[in-house]
Image (spheres, helix red, strand yellow):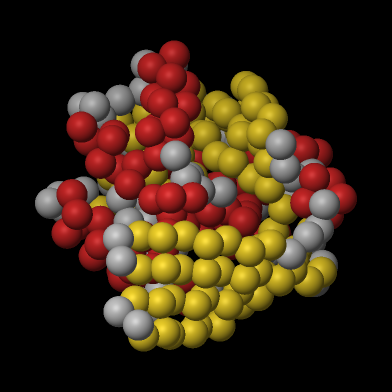
Amino acid sequence: MTQLYSTLANIYHEMYQHIFDYDKEFDFYHSLLQRTNCHKILEIGCGSGMLARRFLDNGYDYLGLDLFNEMLNIARSEIKSDRFIQCDMRSLSFNQQFDAVLITGRSIAYVIENQGILDTLTGIHKSLKDNGLLIFGVFEATGIFDNFNDFEQDIAHNNKKIKRISRLKLNLTTGWTYDWYAKYIIEEHEKSMVFDDVTTLRCFTKDEISLFLKLTGFKIKEIIEEGKAFTILAERISPLNSAYYKDQ
């Protein structure tokens, strides 16, 4: 798994304030949640809490979840809140149920095995109220592989300069997967540090996602196109009637 969320957690926190427009992202989720009157929410892949701050400021009954304690420690420090837990999304277990579950930052891309996808969606189904809402974004396979290009980013944060050089390589071992090789060059106070990182990511076709959701007891309500990605709104169907779930 990538160092970006552990060893480089602080670099992530500084970089992504400039890469993502968190106000715009919050407004997107907020509009969807208001439409369906969802108040009690779980955010999977909450990272350093940039969306969490906005959800809490807007009165949501919020819980944030992430795999990496390094990210959660930043979130707790920044927001002065304990509304965060460490957990693998493939192993969800709650004594409460949520109106909505969000997987933000297209974090499901890091779950590259089919069984892991099924376990994640099954755990989310159990964590939602009847007719609860699942919202998550994925990278779209055709868009990614039709434009499979390396890229570079230069970011200035306070007195720090961060350069990320990204190289992509086909993997395809467990699906529409690829390897992301990244070099981070951090310059601050006339000193330079270099980190090399690699991770495997998964993208999906719409048919794949539709089948995964059907197998785990969800019905797609809407698909929102976003260039090389798409966001899915799915409703929890109760009772479950999928063959996959009955066999568990």
- Name of the residue lying farthest toward the left: 80
In the picture, the quarter occupied by the C terminus is bottom right
Image quadrant in which the N terminus is located? bottom right
Using the image, determine if residue 207 lies above or below residue 75.
above
**x then y, percent, for residue 169:** 78, 71
Q: Which quarter of the picture shows residue 73?
A: bottom left
Identify the image quadrant of residue 173. Answer: bottom right
- Given residues 56 and 211, the one toward you in this image is 56
| Residue in front for this viewpoint, 62 or 170 | 170
Residue, x 38% and y 44% (percent of image)? 43
In the image, what residue occupies the spot 42% across and 84% down? 192
Q: In the image as oriented, which residue stretches furthest toward the front?
A: 190
**Is 204 left, or right, of 5 in this rendering?**
right
Residue nearer the viewer, 203 or 169: 169
Q: Position of residue 246 (x, y in %)?
A: 63, 46
Residue 26 quadrant: top left
The vertical placement of 182 against 209, above or below, is: below
Q: Position of residue 107 (x, y in %)?
A: 53, 54
- Residue in view at x 53 percent, y 30 percent: 236
Frontmost residue, 30 versus 13: 13
